[in-house]
Image (cartoon, grey):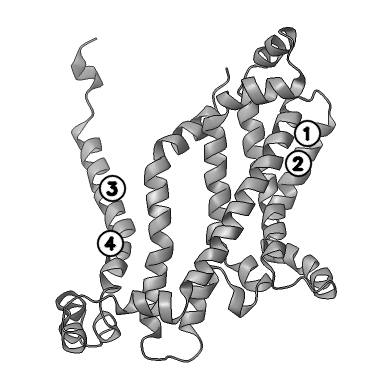
Amino acid sequence: MSSRAHRTPPLLMLFAVVFTVLWLIVAVVPFAWTVWGSFKVEADFFSYTGWIDAITGRRTLEQTGGTMTLDAYRGVWITEEFWKAAVNTIVVTVSVTLISLTFGTLGGYALARSGHRYAFWILIVALLFRAMPGIALVSGYLLPFFELNLWGHLSTTIIVLVALNQPFTLWLLHSFFLSIPRDLDESALVDGCTRFQAFRLIIMPVMWPGLVTTGIFSFLVGYSDFVICATLLSETNQTMVPRIAAFLGTTQQAGRLMYAVAATVSVITPLFILVLFFQRRIVSGLTAGAVKG
């Protein structure tokens, strides 16, 4: 068969190029504009006269002596102590990821290798639990948290986020374990390994792409959650995403909008770097669960 038969039609190629360009404009331009504006003063970035002020930085030059300034970042990280929210976010995110992966890995492996009917119903119940709105489930935790004086602590938020994330983690890891042939387990058992040794030494090294993919999704649950953290944490002990909303407030104050802009860039940039760094593992992990060995 000639190579001409495999050539992409010009019209399809044009459509793909146009779609890609439009997608980049919609996805990249708003973020790039926010990053650029975070180095301006509020009078430029939220100028009533036109968007050209945000490019030239006329008022930024008048107020700071330069067309670019770090005042918004200094204000949000030092004056407003946004670093405390960043520390809380790291604690919550790392804890949710590690706990979810630990229980999800053990549970997913057990359900994938179980020949009993109840394994299917456990997964169905987990799926129904995950389909419920998070805020509806949080209301059930509030009364015991208040009675035990646990409301406002990071540990309570971690417990709820793990409970909400665990069904998804269980399903995802279960599908990855199903893609690994049972012959590996059986060969390890024949060679004298215990069930846990077979799981730890034979299965887990094969599972790394799926584990990384699931870990990233669990990381995003703890990192970007707003409703749960805003409900269960006090205003002085928030994570980064709810803290951004606090900068906006109900009354407008000079400079507070730029704090929100700088905080938004500070939150999104690590996610952008994370996805770029792990993009190949994310794709390989997602496709691994769909291929039977």
Q: Are marks 1 and 3 in contact (CB under 8 Å)?
A: no
Q: Which residue is mark 1?
A: 120
Decide: is 168 above or below 75: above
- Mark 1 surroundings: few (<14), some (14-19) or many (≥20) residues within 10 A: some
Q: Which residue is mark 4?
A: 29
Q: Are marks 4 and 3 in contact (CB under 8 Å)?
A: no
- Say which mark, if any, is on residue 124: 2
Label 4 or label 3, whichever comes before in sequence order: 3
Label 1, label 4: how far apart the Cα atoms are: 45 Å
Determine if residue 210 is in view. Answer: yes
Q: Secondary structure at mark 2?
A: helix
| Image position, residue 205 (x, y; %) | 57, 25
Q: Which residue is mark 3?
A: 19
| Image position, residue 64 (x, y; %) | 21, 85
Q: Secondary structure at mark 1?
A: helix
Q: Amino acid at mark 4?
A: Val
Label 1, label 3: how far apart the Cα atoms are: 41 Å
Quadrant occupied by the C terminus: top right
Decide: is 106 above or below 259: above
Residue found farthest to the front: 78
Which residue is at the front of the view, 260 or 29?
A: 260
Determine if residue 240 is in view. Answer: no
| Image position, residue 103 (x, y; %) | 71, 41
Q: Amino acid at mark 1?
A: Phe
